[in-house]
Image (tube, coloured by chain):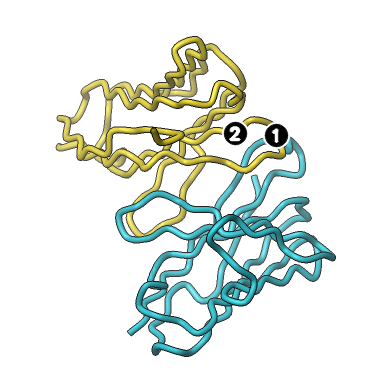
Chain colours: A cyan, B yellow
């Protein structure tokens, strides 16, 4: 299985500011994803982070609000821009196993609180 | 109708009980079925993975898929307090497709 780390693990931010979340994987992976999990709810896919090209966003999520970078096969960042209290959530990085291309693993998450 | 439905619970059982967790889905194209366990303040952890219909057993955990009924189950035998967590079912159409998650069932195993 892939080992995924995220930084920061948690943060408290002021309205109107931006936060960049980092995701590091211990092996090269083809597919990386960013999810949001709002309090008491399930996971919602924000976007697929594509290496060497622009991310693919799901309905309801836009690049201006959630810019994503993926400079190589082991690293990605998600920025939450111009934050509001509604952005308070857990943000999770996820990867698909290079070996099986079927199983999906998750990082520990970044817990964000916007005041 | 939501694409994946799951009773949110909370479900509370005594230690040693058999737990049955279930999901129903509407998209008959789903082929890959997963169960994740999520402890409080942690990321989801893959528990079981099944392709197409049938059963899969791993220790105290058994996953069942009935594609004809669009119904999947996770059974936990001899439940332990350490099994207390939220259990998320998840599924996708192809190996490269995005994963659709159920809302999760909160389980408490009481000592």
Which corner quadrant holds the N terminus of chain B? top left
The mark tally for this picture is 2
The residue located at (68%, 35%) in the rendering is A102
Which residue corresponds to mark 2? B92
Let me know if marks 1 and 2 both belong to one chain: yes
Helix, strand or loop at label 2? It is strand
- C-alpha gap between disc 1 and disc 2: 7 Å
x then y, percent, for residue B46: 51, 40
Q: Are marks 1 and 2 in contact (CB under 8 Å)?
A: yes
Which residue corresponds to mark 1? B95
x then y, percent, for residue A26: 70, 59
x then y, percent, for residue A107: 54, 58
Which corner quadrant holds the C terminus of chain B? top left
Chain bearing tag 1 is: B
The image quadrant of residue A10 is bottom left
The image quadrant of residue B16 is top left
């Amino acid at each position: 299985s892939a080992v995924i780390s995220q930084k920061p693990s948690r943060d408290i931010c002021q309205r109107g500011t931006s936060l960049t979340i980092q995701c590091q994987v211990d092996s090269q992976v083809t597919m990386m994803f960013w999810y949001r999990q709002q309090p008491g709810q399930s996971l919602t896919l924000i976007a697929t982070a594509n290496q060497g090209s622009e991310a693919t966003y799901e309905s309801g999520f836009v690049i201006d609000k959630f810019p994503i970078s993926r400079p190589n096969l082991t690293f990605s960042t998600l920025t939450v821009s111009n934050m509001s209290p509604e952005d308070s959530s857990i943000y999770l990085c996820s990867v698909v196993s290079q070996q099986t291309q079927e199983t999906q693993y998750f990082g520990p998450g970044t817990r964000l609180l916007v005041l | 109708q939501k694409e994946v439905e799951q009773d949110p619970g909370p479900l509370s059982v005594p230690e040693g009980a058999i737990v049955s967790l279930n999901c129903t889905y509407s998209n008959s194209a789903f082929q890959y079925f997963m169960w994740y366990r999520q402890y409080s303040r942690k990321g989801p952890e893959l528990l079981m993975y099944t392709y197409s219909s049938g059963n899969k057993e791993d220790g105290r955990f058994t996953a069942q898929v009935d594609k004809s009924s669009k119904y999947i189950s996770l059974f936990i035998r001899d439940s332990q307090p350490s099994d207390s967590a939220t259990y998320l079912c998840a599924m996708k159409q192809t190996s490269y497709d995005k994963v659709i998650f159920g809302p999760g069932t909160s389980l408490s195993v009481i000592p």
